[in-house]
Amino acid sequence: MGRAPLKLETILITDNQSIDQRISLVGRDLAALRSWAAERGLPAFRAAQVQHGLYQRLATGPRELTDLPLALREELEREVRLSDLRVLNEVRDSSGQTTKTLFALRDGALVESVLMAYGGHDTRRRHTVCLSSQVGCALACTFCATGQQGWARDLTAGEMVEQILYFARLLRTQGDHVSNIVYMGMGEPFLNYDAVLQSVRLLADPAAFGLGARHITISTSGVVPAIRRFAREGLQVGLAVSLHAPDDALRSSLVPLNHRYPVAEVLDACEEYIARTHRRVSFEYTMLEGVNDGPEQVDGLARLLRGMLCHINLIPWNRVDGMPYHPSSPEAIMAFRDRLVEYGLAATIRDTRGSGISAACGQLRTSTLRERKNRQPLPMA
C-alpha cells in the first residue's frame, strides 16, 4: 500500500521562532568535510566516515552516523544538522507511480520535487527524481507556473542534494533506489551554475551518493555561456534544452530568454557540447494547441535539427489555471512525432505524469502560496 498524502500545514518563519544555529554538513564534499573535521581537531578519516554515513547510509541526523563513537555523535547532535528540508505537503497520483513533494526550507521558502517510477516490478524498474535548483524562476516562460512566480533565491548545493536524499530514503524502505536524476524542476539550473555543478559532483561521486554521471541530466532554457562552460567540464552528464519553437519570433513569445540568446546561438552552443562530450542533446518541446504544433513548426524544427546528434522530447502540456493555452491533442502530438521521424529525427512523446496532482513545475507551490495568502489575517480597522 502507498503512503497516505501528508496533511498540509503552513510553515512561516517569524522573529519569535528559534532558528536552528547548528551548521549544515549536507552538500559538503570530502575536502570540505576534512576542513570541518580539522577545525574540530578530528582526524581526517572521520570526514570520510561522515561522508559515507550521510550520502550512502542516508543518515538523517548525527546519531545515525554509527561509524563514529557514541560520545562524538552526541557532541555533533548539538553542533551540526544533516537536514535543511521539511516536508510541507506530499501528493501521489492514483497509480502510485508519481509522488510530488513540497519542501519548506529553513527560511520558509518552498520548493518542489517529483519522484517518478517507470517499468514493472523487476530489476528494470527505474526511479527518476526531478529536482529544483532555485526558489521560483526569473525567466517568465509564458506557459510555466514557476515562471509566473518570479525568482526568490538560488538553492544551495546541499538543498539540492537533500531533495535526492529524501527520495532515496523513501525508496530504500521499498527495497528500491534512485536510478536517474533530472534538474528539470523549479528554476533555471544554469543561472545557479556553481551550486548545481557542486551538487552534481556529489551525486556522481562514487565515494558520496554514487550515481553515475550518465544517469544525471541538466535542463536549461538556453543560457548560452553556461552551455559552453558546461561542455568544458569533462562530465558525462546529459544536457536537455527547452526549445519549444523552431524560430525566434515564436520562441521569444514563449521563452523570453530567447531575446538574449536566440535560437541560432543556442544551437551553436549545443553543437559545441556535442563535439566536446560526444553525447547527444535532448530538446524539450512542450506541445501547445494552435501555437507550436502545426505543419510549419514541425517542418521548421526538422530543418533546424537534421544532422545533429540529438533527441526530441515532445511534452504534452499540463494545464495551468489562468494561462491562455491548451494542450495539443494526442492525435496532433502523434502526427508531429511521426513527421519528425519521417525526417530521420529521433523523437518520442513523453509520458504524461501527475496532471491530477499539480505535478507540472511550480503548480503545487503556487497553490500553497495562494492558500497562505488567503489565510493571512485581515488588517485591523
Image: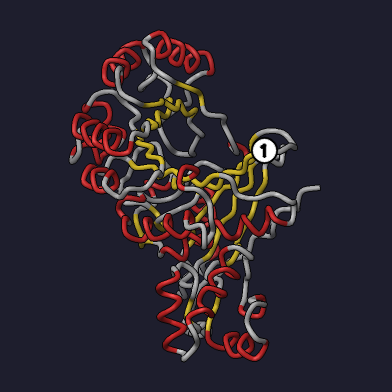
Residue 340 placement, left or right of 307: right
Query: Could you say where residue 261 lies in the image, as x and y percent from the top left?
Result: 20, 38
Residue 193 x/y as whole percent: 31, 55
Q: Residues within 10 Å of mark 1 (few under 14, many from 20)?
A: few
Way the structure is coloured: secondary structure
In the rendered structure, which amino acid carries the disc numbered 1?
A: Arg
Name the residue at 40% across, 28% down: 285
Q: Nearer the viewer, residue 186 or 126?
A: 126
Q: Taking 141 as reference, is 77 left or right? A: right
Task: Name the spot of residue 347 as percent of width and height, x first.
Answer: 44, 21
| Along the line of sight, the residue nearer the viewer: 17 or 172 | 172
Q: Position of residue 276 (x, y in %)?
A: 27, 38
Closer-to-camera residue (167/290)? 167
Q: Residue at x 35, y 38 (%)?
A: 142
**312 relative position to 92: left or right:** left
Judging depth in this view, the residue of 119 and 336 nearest the camera is 119
Q: Quadrant of the C terminus?
A: bottom left
As displayed, is residue 165 above or below residue 241?
A: below
Residue 210 against residue 17 in the figure, above or below: above
* Helix, strand or loop status at disc 1: loop
Image height of 278 relative to 361, above or below: above
Q: Residue at x 61, y 55 (%)?
A: 167
Which residue was labeled with disc 1? 125
Instruction: Name the image quarter holding residue 371.
Output: bottom right
View extreme (top): residue: 342
Quarter of the image where one finds residue 133: bottom left
